Amino acid sequence: MIKIAVLVSGSGSNLQALIDANLSGQIVGVISNKPDAFALQRAEKAKIATAVIEHKQYPSREAFDDVMHQQLLDWDVDLVILAGFMRILSAKFVKAWEGKMINIHPSLLPNYKGMHTHQRVLNTGDVFHGCTVHYVTAELDAGQALAQGVLKVNVHDHAESLADRVHVLEHVIYPQVAEWICNGTIQHTVDGVLYRNQPMQAPVQFCKF
């Protein structure tokens, strides 16, 4: 059984979606860099082990990441899921977990990497928006995309309404990708990413119009 750790910083709505999905893998631990993150309460309610590792307690990003890395090893983790984890990870940490760490980003990557994606989509006048689950690499929001939730931007949408609608999609596609990794539907190999034993050419798309 795949052992999963989830890294959080905030309310943990994506963590809750993962818990509620009853994955064939097991969430063995939740790490937060903020002791007051509501996500920790969600984990405790689900009887999942938690660890608070405050980044402010460490002299460097690398020192903080080293402690996180050791905690993941202690839990014997196979898959790391970033769920609202608001820290940029060091290249060393990312390399150590390459092919074993996924993130969800609120845009249709490769468009709109970085922050403030909803407002940027509105500013550009795009017709479609959504979210992307991808493998984490050292380059921000640049790892291979595994799945995308796609929605149509409404004429009355604003940044907050778009964020709310994208969140709904996140809670659908993130647990699905996690389950696909757990059951072997998605595999990260030395020759690339496989989906149903075939090279993955493009992310799987879930559309909500």
Image: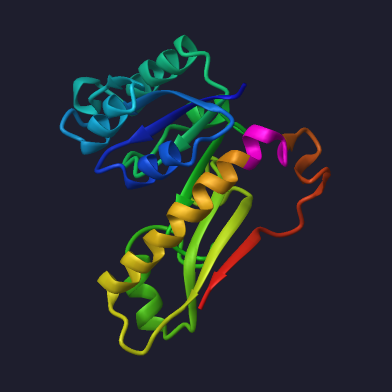
In the image, residue 188 above or below residue 93: below
Q: Residue at x 49, y 55 (%)?
A: 172
Q: Residue at x 32, y 65 (%)?
A: 164
User: Percent position (x, y) of residue 134?
Assistant: 56, 49
Looking at the image, residue 38 sits to the left or right of residue 21; the answer is left
Count of marks overlaid on the render: 0
Residue 8 lies in quadrant: top left
Residue 160 lies in quadrant: bottom left
User: Percent position (x, y) of residue 82?
Assistant: 43, 39
Q: Which residues are magenta?
A: 180-187
Residue 158 part of the magenta-drawn span:
no
Residue 182 part of the magenta-drawn span:
yes
Which residue is nearer to you in this view: 169 or 189?
169
Looking at the image, residue 17 sits to the left or right of residue 78; the answer is left
Which residue is nearer to you in this view: 26 or 102?
26
Looking at the image, residue 17 sits to the left or right of residue 40; the answer is right
Q: Residue at x 48, y 41 (%)?
A: 21
User: Percent position (x, y) of residue 45?
Assistant: 27, 28
Q: Quadrant of the N terminus?
A: top right
In the image, residue 57 above or below residue 121: above
In this picture the colour scheme is rainbow
Q: Residue at x 63, y 33 (%)?
A: 182
Q: Residue furthest left?
A: 36
Q: Residue furthest bottom?
A: 155
Q: Residue furthest right?
A: 198
In the image, residue 71 above or below residue 88: above
User: Percent position (x, y) of residue 18?
Assistant: 44, 40
